[in-house]
């Protein structure tokens, strides 16, 4: 199956070799994530080796000054209590309680910060109804303080349940909620078309999970091509589009597309990760674009860190320099 659309990003042989090396590197890191020795080592030393570059702290108290500093630089933010795969109903309810408290604290601190959350952290693996009730409570509370909730997308096996919960929330009258689509999945173009009647608020990502060739594009060039196709459809049809990427070629393409089609800057923003390309984030703000920095916190930072290392070799080099020190 080929990627949608005719938009392309220029390629060269060296670029193709680099993409192949990065793919092998990414798969190796993601496979190592489940290794017991790697897990033990990173959990013990990770914060000292550089995990703090990507995580705002282990508590929300530690995250608040980081979020405020980013806001003062003209950057919007979201925050996430790191964690996933909760299989205890009481614990899942506790996560929802924590998010409600964080929403109150955001309002009290006057931060330009919204919430991004994972449904498996709220009990999705215990059943769709349990996750729905927990996220509904968070979304309803966010509405009372004028805030917004982004439901993150997880592995391909959880896409149907995630989109079903998003649709239920919209049917219940909640407009202060959005979700995420992944360009690496074959199914995403169809999912987008099915969601468009809702005029959704969507974030577009390339995808950070290790997926098989049965469900996902394996070549970077295919993912990039599909990303551009999906981005253009979202910019044309969605109420709001979050372009989540650090890829300057994609950013330039989006800027050019929005200028040519008269799409106002109030209809989209660029989203990037805390600790990655901070100068690019500030440069885009100076050019007049909205930029949101995803700024997570929490003690369960291991899986988050490993995905960041898999996404970009430079991130691993940063941690290795910390090890050398």
Image (cartoon, rainbow, N blue to C red):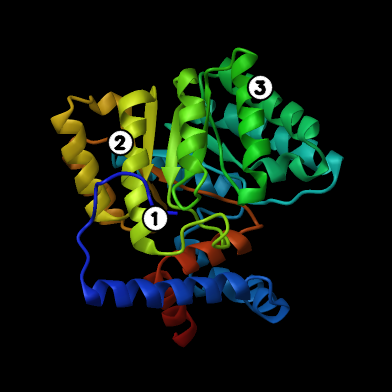
Q: Is residue 57 left or right of residue 266?
A: right
In the rendered image, the residue lying farthest to the top is: 173
Q: Nearer the viewer, residue 107 or 130?
A: 130
Residue drawn at the location 53% of the way across and 49% of the way down: 296
Q: Name the residue that disc number 3 marks.
A: 168
Q: Nearer the viewer, residue 53 or 82?
A: 82
Q: Is residue 297 left or right of residue 50?
A: right
Residue drawn at the location 29% of the way across and 38% of the way down: 74
Q: Name the residue that disc number 2 marks.
A: 232
Q: Is residue 79 left or right of residue 75?
A: right
Q: Identify the secondary structure beneath mark 3.
A: helix
Quadrant in which the N terminus is drawn: bottom left
Q: Name the residue that disc number 1 marks.
A: 223
**Residue 87 in view, yes or no:** yes
Q: Quadrant of residue 35?
A: bottom right
**Residue 90, horizontal then vertical, whole percent:** 85, 39
Q: Earlier in the sequence, mark 1 or mark 3?
A: 3
Foreground mark, 1 or 3, reads 1
- Marks 1/3 in contact by CB < 8 Å: the verdict is no
**Residue 169, horizontal then vertical, whole percent:** 63, 21
**Residue 315, horizontal then vertical, whole percent:** 41, 69
Mark 2 closeness class: few <14, some 14–19, many ≥20 residues within 10 Å = some
Q: Up-down: is 265 above or below 213?
A: above
Q: Identify the secondary structure beneath mark 1.
A: helix
């Amino acid at each position: 199956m080929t990627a949608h659309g005719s938009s392309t990003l220029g390629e060269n042989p060296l670029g193709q070799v680099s993409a192949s090396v990065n793919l092998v590197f990414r798969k190796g890191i993601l496979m190592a994530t489940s290794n017991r020795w790697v897990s033990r080592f990173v959990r013990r030393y990770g914060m000292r080796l550089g995990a703090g570059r990507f995580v705002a702290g282990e508590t929300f108290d530690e995250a608040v000054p980081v979020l405020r500093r980013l806001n003062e630089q003209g950057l919007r933010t979201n925050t996430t209590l790191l964690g996933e795969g909760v299989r205890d109903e009481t614990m899942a309810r506790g996560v929802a309680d924590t998010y409600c408290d964080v929403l109150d604290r955001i309002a009290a601190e006057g931060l330009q910060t919204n919430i991004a959350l994972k449904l498996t952290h709220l009990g999705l693996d215990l059943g769709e109804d349990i996750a729905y009730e927990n996220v509904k409570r968070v979304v309803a509370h966010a509405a009372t303080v004028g805030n917004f909730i982004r439901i993150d997308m997880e592995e391909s096996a959880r896409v149907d349940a995630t989109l079903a919960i998003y649709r239920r929330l919209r049917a219940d009258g909640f407009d202060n909620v959005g979700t995420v689509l992944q360009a690496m999945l074959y199914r995403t173009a169809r999912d987008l078309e099915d969601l468009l009647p809702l005029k959704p608020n969507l974030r577009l990502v390339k995808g950070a999970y290790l997926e098989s060739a049965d469900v996902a594009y394996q070549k970077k060039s295919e993912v990039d091509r599909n990303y551009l196709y999906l981005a253009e459809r979202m910019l044309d049809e969605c109420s709001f589009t979050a372009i989540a990427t650090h890829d300057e070629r994609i950013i330039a393409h989006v800027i050019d597309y929005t200028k040519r089609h008269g799409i106002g800057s109030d209809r989209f923003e660029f989203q990037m990760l805390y600790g990655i390309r901070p100068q690019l984030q500030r440069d885009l703000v100076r050019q007049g674009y909205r930029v949101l920095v995803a700024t997570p916190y929490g003690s369960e930072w291991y899986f988050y860190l490993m995905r960041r290392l898999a996404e970009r070799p430079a991130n691993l080099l940063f941690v290795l320099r910390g090890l050398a020190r």
